[in-house]
Amino acid sequence: MKINTSLSKFFALGLTLVSMCFSCSEDPNTNFEVLFVTPINESVLENTFDVVVEVQPTVELNEVELSVNNIVIGADDSSPYEFTINIDGYSSGEYELKAIAKARAGSSSQAQLVIHIAKPTLEQPVDFSASRGSFGNKIALQWNVVPKATSYEVYKLDLNGNYEKIAVTSETVFEDININSPLTQYFYKVRAFESNKIFGEFSEVRYGYTSGKPYDLIRSFGVEGTAIHEFGFVALISKGSDELLYLADDYRSNVKIYTVEGSFQGLLKNGVDSQAPIFPAGKTVTTNGQSIVLEQPGSAAVVVNTNHSIIGQMTNDTNGNIYLAVNYNPTDEFNHHRIYKYDQNGNYLMNWGTKGLGEGQLNEPWGVSYYDNQIIVTCQLTISAQFFGLSGEFKNSIDFSDFVKITYGNFVKDDYLYVAAGTCILKTDMDGLIIEKIGEDILTNATSVVVLNNNDIVVAEPYSRKIRILRKN
């Protein structure tokens, strides 16, 4: 057998002619070199595929004949020598491709290789969905479990119109964060996958898009009803050091305890008209009508009648002193809009404020929080945050009237002030710079806000009977 120089190089590497996809002529007078360009040896093919054969030299070459398992499927007499094989007529399995270069004089050279045709054997994922505007900068995919599947391949349509594999996951959910443009449709499909020979049918194609907004609504919970875990009118929330949420339900006269995941943990208080609790100096402070209730493990509850209508939030300073807002007393009736201060044992210390819209005045005070030896007050009708010293001296204010129409509760974290403002949560620094309006197009009646340790924002929407949790994306 005559071996040309290029072939002898492969023999030197210890490789067979079959594995390299070409062979020498069976006729010693033939000098054809036959090579499979595509596919390569041991390819696994799932769809109709092209076979491209290269022959050198082409002088005296008549045609190239292609066979599958020794069954001729076609011939080509012009370079490039190309064939298309539709796998619909084949079962999954191993097949030999053979290309025979035939000379006009009748001699021939050939090359062969092995391919594997693989067809789906696992079921198609069903209920495949892609999020549409639910998130600011990601698209969430989910689908049902496929029996016998241990992993899944996720494909995404690229700019060239081809589906590109972007992930392999053992879960039935996937989040695509590689999104370049909001409000743009991105198309996906998914299939069960075990190996390149064992896989399933593709799901239906689904598209999703992002909103482009900086915050995502990651969770909502709450349903209207009369059961102890159901909502009547939850307008105030607070949180403990353990990150449990305390929901003051005005209509149901109780304080509910929930995890941030929305799991009901029972009642802190029942049969009481209470604000959301605070926890100064190891105590639990709630209210009941016009009274403050202070409780501590191992001690009897202390009940202090303020003789005022307590509204909105309560807060405490680093010494455990308690601050709360009122809007009524028997003498001034509903013109008594003030902040009251009590010590950690419930002893009255002082009060301040007058009803009005001027600086230092209060009009339906609702949000009361502590920051750096100051008390920050937000009122429903004074569209601002006002800063007072711990003895009630007015210091300064931040005007919100150009941004929102009402303000309710507020919360301080990491030198930022968060204000529940009905249709959004305003975030500002302590110098009055408005940083962002959070939750626009998500919130409609936000009255109370707390911020978790991970900076998730928890909002009470009493008219929707919902607690909403937003996360910066």
Image: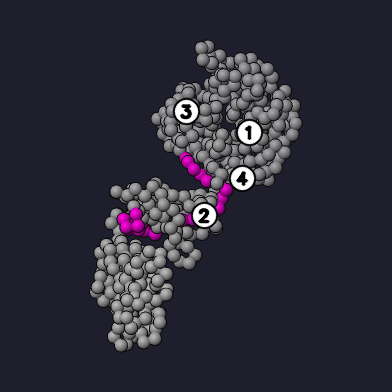
Q: Main secondary structure of the magenta part?
A: loop
Residue 396 located within the stretch drawn in magenta: no
The residue that disc 4 covers is: 437
Residue 160, position as x, y percentages in the image: 48, 67
Q: Tags 4 and 1 in contact by the CB under 8 Å rule?
A: no
| Nearest to viewer (mark 2 / mark 4) | 2
Query: Which residue is more in the foreground, 214 or 124?
Result: 124
Query: Which residue is more in the foreground, 15 or 218?
Result: 15
Q: Amino acid at mark 2?
A: Asn
Which of disc 3 and disc 1 is earlier in sequence?
A: 3
Res 291 visible? no
Query: Going 53% across and 14% down the picture, which residue do you hit?
Result: 301
The residue that disc 3 covers is: 256
Q: Amino acid at mark 3?
A: Lys
The answer for how far apart the CA atoms under marks 3 and 4 are is: 28 Å
Secondary structure beneath disc 4? strand
| Nearest to viewer (mark 4 / mark 1) | 1
Checking the image for residue 412, the label placed there is 1
Q: Residues within 10 Å of mark 2 (few under 14, many from 20)?
A: few
Magenta range: 195-220
Which of disc 4 and disc 3 is earlier in sequence?
A: 3
Quick one: quadrant of the N terminus?
bottom left
Query: Going 37% across and 75% down the picture, which residue do you hit?
Result: 3
Query: Going 49% across and 56% down the picture, which residue do you hit?
Result: 209
When the figure is inspected, residue 353 is found, relative to residue 262, above or below; the finding is above
Secondary structure beneath disc 3? strand
The residue that disc 2 covers is: 178
Q: Amino acid at mark 1?
A: Val
